[in-house]
Amino acid sequence: MANVVRGVDAHDGSAIWQVTLGRPIQGNFPLPNNATIDFHAINDHWGCLSTGVIDPETARFYQVCWESPDNSGDPRTARYFMHVLSVADGSAVVPKVLIDGLDFNAGMRKARSSAVLISPQGVKTLLQCTGSVNETAAGSSGYCFAFDLASNKVTAMMATTKGNGAGIWMAGAGLACDTDQDCYAMTGNGDFDGVSQWGESFIKLRYTPANAGNVATLQVVDHWTPWTDAARSGANLTTAAAKAKPLDKLAGESLESEEVRPVGGGMNMPLTNAPAKVGHDERGQAVFSVFPPLSPQARTDQDLGSGGVVYISALNIVCGGGKDGLIYCMNAAKMGGTKLTDFVNAHANCAKLIGGTPVWGTVTPGTIQEGFDPCPQDPRKLNFLPFGDSAHIHSTPVVMFDPVLNAWTLFVWGENQRLRKWQLSATAAPRLVGQGADFASSDVRGNSPGGMPGGFCAGSSNKKDPLSYLLVCTVPRGDANGSRVQGHIVIYDPVHPGTDGFLPKLWDSDTWGWSGTQPGTKYNLFNKFMPPVIDGGEIILPNYSGGVLLIAQ
């Protein structure tokens, strides 16, 4: 975050090299209307906001960082640069390259989504996407750009909307790419028309390198969209211009959570007389859901792209979900091409999905018969809090082949909820087949809207040996949205659920004394948006003070 990049020995965590890549941005730099780029004032500096990539053939590390060329720390004059470093010693292989094109540098951007390395037509290319600091103000479009590894130049750039918003956040995840080198993403709040505006959408991106005198291109070639921000605010379903949007909303500010957050330890007014409905989950257990009377601005803050997207090549499907806690899966070869007129019939639009419907990915509030339709004609019916807590997806699902089920499975851990396991198919909607017993943000559940952002997981196995499968997750105890909080690491057996349907927990860092014993230490602070890395029997997890935690068998 402070533009410091470190090379660390993955065997013992010892430092090898360290470089600083330009002056970082001051997190509390005063902006108009008493604003700063950091809504909750958690991070002092902003710099390398996303994860870069390593080209294993050249041992070069490619990292985009936000820098202050005039050394003022002012985000309004800051610029993004691509750094190409040697993995061996951190030295610059080439001079840093300014990220520029279209109107990219006309506003403050957030390059939060990670980089991905592809090779269309054999041309090594880095793709990366961004959002904007002022998420929905004029000029706030998201952007994607291509960086050619041979020439070290930005060769193509596109805006995700000709309107406002449609940033690509995906909890810090990068694009998911298929064997044809096409890549998939989800966008957040923003304008949508299905032609040049891609807010709240799954999009398929195609990069075509320059050849035969033609310039390189980056474009949206397919998409699918569940609803629009216009509909979430109560506007006419086909009138994009009628959208009530939160003007100048800062990225990272969750309007719907802030409106229902308790004030002074008491219940906030929007929940005092909120209507409620009781449904039943897959186990037949009652789920009490509260429907807060949110403002139109808060209702339009439902970021489809708050979580990451995954591509499963064996099934040729794309899956992902966002703040509604829903999982959408679609055919990667024919996503649906949603148009504004498709929203006249929501179920017909959802019929384009695998199995014809989304599923309640993080918590099942009830059945359609009980009034909990995952694809309602009026999407405002999706604005509810199960048990009074949010159930957003802020992580990238984990995809693993289950040798016991002989099927591909997906794991997702929503905020304030349990880890959930879904069986995937190319023809049927995802089917719930297991869950964990632990809850995310356990210290604040029941204190509406609970905590953020849920669990972040990684999977590992020794080929298809069912006894070798592990799912490792980091989970917050409190609300990591507004402050630094304690967390813990849990390890599950992901393929042998018990007779009660719960996944066996093999280990918890609590039993090791790593978490919950020394508040504020660098080891037990939950590192938001950071899934663990598993390699050679070791779990590798960067901590909140710039170091790396290693856990071995």
Image (cartoon, grey):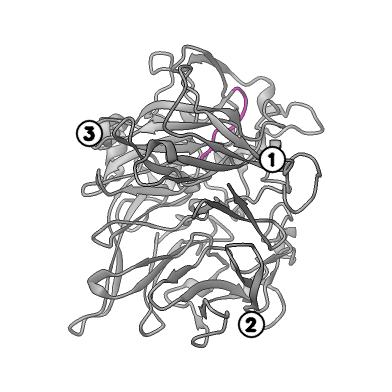
Residue named by callout 2: 69
Q: What span is in magenta?
A: 387-393
Residue named by callout 3: 427
What separation in Å lies between label 2 and label 3 (alpha carbons)? 52 Å
Q: Is 322 on the left or on the right of 49, as rendered?
A: left
Tell which of 432 and 39 is nearer to you: 432
Residue named by callout 1: 479
The image quadrant of residue 398 is top left
The crowd level at tag 2 (other Cα within 10 Å; few <14, some 14-19, many 20+) is: some
- Label 1 residue SS: loop
Tell which of 320 and 521 is nearer to you: 521
Q: Is 154 on the left or on the right of 266, as rendered?
A: left
Kind of residue sitting beneath label 1 = Asp
Instruction: Give the mark nearer the N terminus: 3 vs 1.
Output: 3
Q: Are marks 2 and 1 in contact (CB under 8 Å)?
A: no
**Is residue 389 highlighted in magenta?**
yes
Height in image: 386 above or below 486? above
Kind of residue sitting beneath label 2 = Pro
Q: Residue at x 43, y 28 (%)?
A: 496
What separation in Å lies between label 3 and label 1 (alpha carbons)? 38 Å
